[in-house]
Image: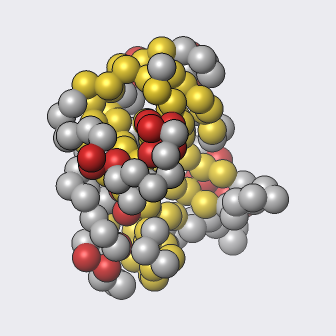
Amino acid sequence: RTAMTRYAVDDLKIGEKVTGTVTGFFKNIGANVDLGLELPGFIHVAAMSKDRVEKPEDMLSIGDRITGRVLTVTRTTAKTPAQIKMSMVELPVFDKDLDAVNALKVGNEVTGTVTGFTKVGAMLDLGLPFPGFLHVKQMTGDRGKDPEGVFIVGEKVTARIRSVKGDRGGEVELTML
Protein backbone atom coordinates (compact mmCIF):
# COMPACT_ATOMS: atom_id res chain seq x y z
CA ARG A 1 0.00 0.00 0.00
CA THR A 2 1.03 3.61 -0.35
CA ALA A 3 2.55 5.81 2.34
CA MET A 4 -0.70 7.77 2.24
CA THR A 5 -2.64 4.62 3.23
CA ARG A 6 -0.30 3.99 6.17
CA TYR A 7 -0.75 7.59 7.23
CA ALA A 8 -4.53 7.15 7.13
CA VAL A 9 -4.35 4.09 9.44
CA ASP A 10 -1.99 5.85 11.84
CA ASP A 11 -4.29 8.86 11.82
CA LEU A 12 -7.45 6.91 12.79
CA LYS A 13 -9.01 7.98 16.07
CA ILE A 14 -11.02 5.87 18.50
CA GLY A 15 -14.69 6.61 17.89
CA GLU A 16 -14.12 7.77 14.29
CA LYS A 17 -16.69 6.53 11.74
CA VAL A 18 -15.37 4.21 9.03
CA THR A 19 -17.12 2.49 6.12
CA GLY A 20 -16.15 -0.77 4.50
CA THR A 21 -17.30 -3.95 2.76
CA VAL A 22 -17.87 -7.28 4.50
CA THR A 23 -15.42 -9.77 2.97
CA GLY A 24 -15.96 -12.87 5.11
CA PHE A 25 -16.70 -14.34 8.49
CA PHE A 26 -14.48 -15.74 11.24
CA LYS A 27 -16.22 -18.74 12.80
CA ASN A 28 -19.26 -17.47 14.72
CA ILE A 29 -17.20 -14.68 16.26
CA GLY A 30 -17.39 -11.84 13.77
CA ALA A 31 -16.98 -10.40 10.29
CA ASN A 32 -13.93 -9.26 8.35
CA VAL A 33 -14.30 -5.84 6.72
CA ASP A 34 -12.25 -4.28 3.90
CA LEU A 35 -11.84 -0.62 4.84
CA GLY A 36 -9.53 0.17 1.92
CA LEU A 37 -6.63 0.58 4.35
CA GLU A 38 -3.48 -1.43 5.04
CA LEU A 39 -5.13 -3.17 8.01
CA PRO A 40 -8.35 -5.16 7.82
CA GLY A 41 -11.38 -4.26 9.86
CA PHE A 42 -13.05 -6.75 12.20
CA ILE A 43 -16.42 -6.50 13.88
CA HIS A 44 -17.29 -8.87 16.73
CA VAL A 45 -20.87 -10.23 16.89
CA ALA A 46 -21.40 -8.37 20.20
CA ALA A 47 -20.63 -5.07 18.42
CA MET A 48 -23.11 -5.64 15.56
CA SER A 49 -26.31 -4.90 17.48
CA LYS A 50 -27.55 -4.09 20.95
CA ASP A 51 -29.61 -7.27 20.60
CA ARG A 52 -27.96 -10.68 20.90
CA VAL A 53 -26.56 -11.93 17.58
CA GLU A 54 -25.78 -15.67 17.50
CA LYS A 55 -23.57 -15.60 14.40
CA PRO A 56 -22.44 -12.83 12.07
CA GLU A 57 -24.31 -14.27 9.07
CA ASP A 58 -27.59 -13.56 10.93
CA MET A 59 -26.84 -9.85 10.66
CA LEU A 60 -24.55 -9.37 7.64
CA SER A 61 -23.82 -10.81 4.19
CA ILE A 62 -20.60 -10.83 2.20
CA GLY A 63 -20.53 -7.68 0.07
CA ASP A 64 -22.61 -5.58 2.51
CA ARG A 65 -21.37 -1.99 2.96
CA ILE A 66 -21.34 -1.14 6.65
CA THR A 67 -20.44 1.89 8.72
CA GLY A 68 -19.12 1.63 12.24
CA ARG A 69 -16.89 3.32 14.76
CA VAL A 70 -13.24 2.47 15.42
CA LEU A 71 -12.74 0.71 18.76
CA THR A 72 -9.04 -0.13 18.49
CA VAL A 73 -6.19 -0.16 16.00
CA THR A 74 -3.70 -2.93 16.75
CA ARG A 75 -0.52 -4.05 15.07
CA THR A 76 0.43 -7.73 14.89
CA THR A 77 1.54 -9.26 18.19
CA ALA A 78 2.24 -12.84 19.23
CA LYS A 79 -1.43 -13.22 20.23
CA THR A 80 -3.37 -11.08 17.76
CA PRO A 81 -3.24 -10.15 14.09
CA ALA A 82 -3.10 -6.54 12.98
CA GLN A 83 -6.61 -5.19 12.65
CA ILE A 84 -9.01 -2.33 13.17
CA LYS A 85 -11.76 -3.42 15.56
CA MET A 86 -15.03 -1.64 14.97
CA SER A 87 -18.59 -1.40 16.30
CA MET A 88 -21.87 -0.89 14.47
CA VAL A 89 -23.65 -0.15 17.74
CA GLU A 90 -24.10 3.61 18.00
CA LEU A 91 -22.52 4.80 21.22
CA PRO A 92 -21.98 8.36 22.40
CA VAL A 93 -18.74 9.84 21.09
CA PHE A 94 -17.53 13.29 22.03
CA ASP A 95 -14.22 14.90 22.95
CA LYS A 96 -14.44 14.28 26.69
CA ASP A 97 -14.66 10.53 25.92
CA LEU A 98 -11.03 10.51 24.82
CA ASP A 99 -10.00 12.06 28.14
CA ALA A 100 -12.06 9.41 29.96
CA VAL A 101 -10.48 6.61 27.90
CA ASN A 102 -6.99 7.83 28.72
CA ALA A 103 -7.93 8.09 32.42
CA LEU A 104 -9.04 4.43 32.68
CA LYS A 105 -6.91 2.54 35.19
CA VAL A 106 -6.86 -1.10 36.23
CA GLY A 107 -8.60 -1.42 39.60
CA ASN A 108 -10.92 1.59 39.10
CA GLU A 109 -14.60 1.04 39.90
CA VAL A 110 -17.04 1.81 37.05
CA THR A 111 -20.80 1.60 36.61
CA GLY A 112 -22.34 0.63 33.30
CA THR A 113 -25.60 -0.51 31.77
CA VAL A 114 -25.91 -4.03 30.31
CA THR A 115 -26.56 -3.60 26.56
CA GLY A 116 -26.19 -7.16 25.26
CA PHE A 117 -24.65 -10.58 25.61
CA THR A 118 -22.27 -12.97 23.92
CA LYS A 119 -22.08 -16.67 24.73
CA VAL A 120 -19.32 -15.92 27.25
CA GLY A 121 -20.20 -12.58 28.76
CA ALA A 122 -22.07 -9.29 28.93
CA MET A 123 -21.41 -5.98 27.17
CA LEU A 124 -21.76 -2.85 29.30
CA ASP A 125 -22.22 0.72 28.10
CA LEU A 126 -19.71 2.72 30.14
CA GLY A 127 -20.54 6.01 28.39
CA LEU A 128 -17.49 5.62 26.14
CA PRO A 129 -17.22 5.01 22.38
CA PHE A 130 -16.90 1.26 23.08
CA PRO A 131 -18.43 -1.18 25.55
CA GLY A 132 -16.89 -2.81 28.59
CA PHE A 133 -16.87 -6.62 28.64
CA LEU A 134 -17.66 -8.74 31.69
CA HIS A 135 -16.74 -12.41 31.11
CA VAL A 136 -19.14 -14.92 32.66
CA LYS A 137 -16.32 -16.33 34.82
CA GLN A 138 -15.79 -12.83 36.24
CA MET A 139 -19.54 -12.63 37.00
CA THR A 140 -19.99 -15.91 38.79
CA GLY A 141 -16.73 -17.83 38.99
CA ASP A 142 -18.48 -20.53 36.92
CA ARG A 143 -17.54 -20.82 33.23
CA GLY A 144 -20.69 -22.83 32.45
CA LYS A 145 -23.18 -20.18 33.58
CA ASP A 146 -25.28 -18.43 30.90
CA PRO A 147 -24.63 -14.66 31.16
CA GLU A 148 -28.30 -13.94 30.38
CA GLY A 149 -29.18 -15.80 33.56
CA VAL A 150 -27.02 -13.43 35.62
CA PHE A 151 -28.10 -10.00 34.29
CA ILE A 152 -30.83 -8.47 32.14
CA VAL A 153 -30.45 -5.82 29.42
CA GLY A 154 -30.79 -2.36 30.95
CA GLU A 155 -29.53 -3.44 34.39
CA LYS A 156 -26.96 -1.14 36.05
CA VAL A 157 -23.82 -3.02 37.08
CA THR A 158 -20.88 -1.80 39.15
CA ALA A 159 -17.62 -3.56 38.36
CA ARG A 160 -13.86 -3.12 38.61
CA ILE A 161 -11.58 -2.61 35.60
CA ARG A 162 -9.55 -5.80 35.13
CA SER A 163 -7.59 -4.70 32.06
CA VAL A 164 -7.46 -1.96 29.45
CA LYS A 165 -6.17 -2.97 26.01
CA GLY A 166 -5.47 -1.09 22.83
CA ASP A 167 -3.44 1.97 21.96
CA ARG A 168 -5.89 4.35 23.62
CA GLY A 169 -7.96 2.04 25.82
CA GLY A 170 -10.12 0.42 23.14
CA GLU A 171 -11.08 -2.64 25.19
CA VAL A 172 -12.07 -2.65 28.83
CA GLU A 173 -12.36 -6.02 30.58
CA LEU A 174 -14.27 -5.98 33.85
CA THR A 175 -14.67 -8.12 36.96
CA MET A 176 -17.34 -8.03 39.64
CA LEU A 177 -16.48 -6.25 42.89
Q: Is residue 37 visible?
A: yes
Q: Quadrant of the N terminus?
A: bottom right
* Residue displayed at 32% across by 25% down: 157
At a point 50% along the width and 32% down the height, the residue shown is 174
The quarter holding residue 86 reads: bottom left
Residue 172 position in % (x across, y down): 52, 35
- Residue drawn where x is 45% and y is 38% of the image: 140
Point out residue 12 in the picture as x, y percentages from the top left corner.
Answer: 54, 46
In the image, taking residue 165 as reference, residue 97 lies left or right, namely left
Q: Examine the rendered structure and indicate whether residue 86 appears above or below residue 39.
A: above
Nearest the viewer among 147 and 50 is: 147
Query: Taking 19 as reference, is 27 above or below it?
Result: below
Q: Name the residue at 40% across, 51% down.
A: 145
The correct choice, above or below, for 40 with respect to 136 in the image is: below
Residue 164 horizontal side relative to residue 142, left or right: right
Q: Quadrant of residue 110?
A: top left
Residue 104 found in image quarter: top right
